[in-house]
Image (cartoon, grey):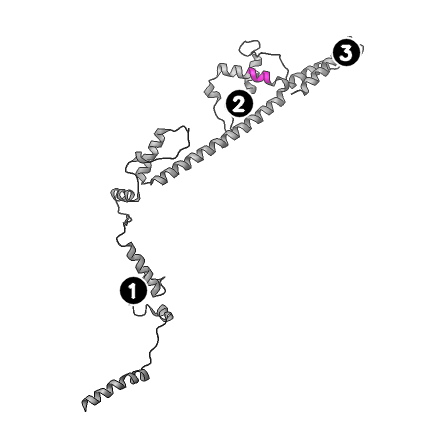
């Protein structure tokens, strides 16, 4: 009797389970929304799980973490770290063992201040700079200085050309003559380095029109002094020409009197002076 009962129970069990206990299928959507349900509140609230949306994301995060296990990791020193702690970090990151091992990519034929470069290497090593970082800083400084020199040269050239134009307009045909006298006098009494001093407008002291005019005027006042004499014919400045024309054409002069024996010569001289004034 008992064996028959057992047989019936075994046969009826599957039918009772399927009829009375419905099974809810587990879908990916259910796993995505409910995967944290069975975790404790403390773990649920952990920030590291904040961006993990499903089991797939959790698995990827775990695999990635496992790959990092055993990797050569560098601990970040805290505020209590000593200089020795930082030295260890710098070495692991790839800082050269000595300052002399830094190498720099500098333009060919560039004049180098080796002492300044060595001082930079010492400081770079002390600060823990990697080779690429140190080289990048030297390149940046080098490019900045080169650009500054180019801009200064361009500014000096422009200022020098403007000064020359100004003096040519003022001196006319006497330009070369006055430049020669001013240059000769300046070089005889001034040091070359002083004349090459850079001014704020980009010109050198010896090229500035105000300085040139001062030396030219001084040379003229020194008269026949051999230091100030220039070779070639003497020329008049437009101002000097205007003065001579004024003297020749003053009221009562031969210029205005057709019957005066010097009238023709006076008129011709005035015309000649006016032509010279127009020649630059």
Mark positioned earlier in the residue sequence (1 or 2)? 1
Q: Is residue 74 above or below residue 226?
A: below
Q: Are marks 1 and 2 in contact (CB under 8 Å)?
A: no
Of 250 and 103, the residue lying toward us: 103
Q: Which residues are magenta?
A: 176-181
Let me know if residue 139 is in the magenta part. no
Q: Which mark is residue 43?
A: 1
Of 111 and 19, the residue lying toward us: 19
Q: Is residue 67 left or right of residue 189?
A: left
User: Residue at 75% across / 10% down in the picture?
Assistant: 265
As helix, strand or loop, the secondary structure at mark 3 comes to: helix
Q: Is residue 190 above or below residue 28?
A: above
Kindly identify which residue carries mark 3. Answer: 264
Q: For marks 1 and 2, give the CA distance.
A: 80 Å
Crowd tier of the residue under label 3, counting other residues whose Cα lies within 10 Å: few below 14, some 14–19, many 20 or above: some
Let me know if residue 178 is in the magenta part. yes
């Amino acid at each position: 009797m008992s064996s028959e009962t057992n047989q019936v129970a075994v046969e009826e069990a599957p039918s009772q389970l399927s009829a009375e206990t419905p099974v809810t299928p587990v879908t990916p959507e259910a796993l995505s929304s409910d995967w944290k349900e069975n975790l404790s509140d403390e773990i649920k609230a952990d920030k590291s799980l904040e961006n993990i949306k499903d089991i797939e994301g959790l698995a990827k995060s775990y695999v990635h973490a496992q790959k990092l296990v055993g990797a050569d990791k560098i601990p970040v020193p805290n505020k209590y770290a000593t200089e020795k702690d930082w030295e260890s970090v710098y070495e692991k990151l790839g800082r050269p063992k000595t300052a002399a091992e830094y190498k720099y990519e500098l333009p060919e034929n560039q004049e180098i201040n080796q002492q300044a470069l060595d001082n930079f290497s010492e400081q770079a090593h002390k600060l823990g700079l990697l080779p690429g970082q140190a080289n990048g800083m030297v390149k940046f400084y080098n490019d900045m200085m080169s650009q500054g020199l180019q801009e200064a040269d361009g500014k000096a050239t422009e200022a020098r050309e403007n000064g020359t134009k100004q003096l040519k307009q003022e001196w006319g045909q006497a330009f070369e003559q006055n430049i020669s006298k001013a240059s000769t006098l300046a070089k005889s009494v001034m040091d070359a380095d002083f004349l090459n001093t850079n001014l704020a407008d980009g010109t050198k002291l010896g090229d500035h029109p105000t300085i040139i005019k001062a030396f030219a005027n001084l040379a003229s006042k020194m008269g026949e002094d051999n230091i100030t004499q220039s070779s070639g014919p003497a020329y008049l400045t437009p101002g000097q020409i205007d003065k001579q024309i004024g003297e020749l054409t003053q009221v009562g002069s031969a210029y205005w009197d057709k019957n005066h024996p010097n009238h023709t010569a006076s008129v011709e001289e005035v015309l000649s002076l006016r032509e010279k004034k127009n020649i630059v």
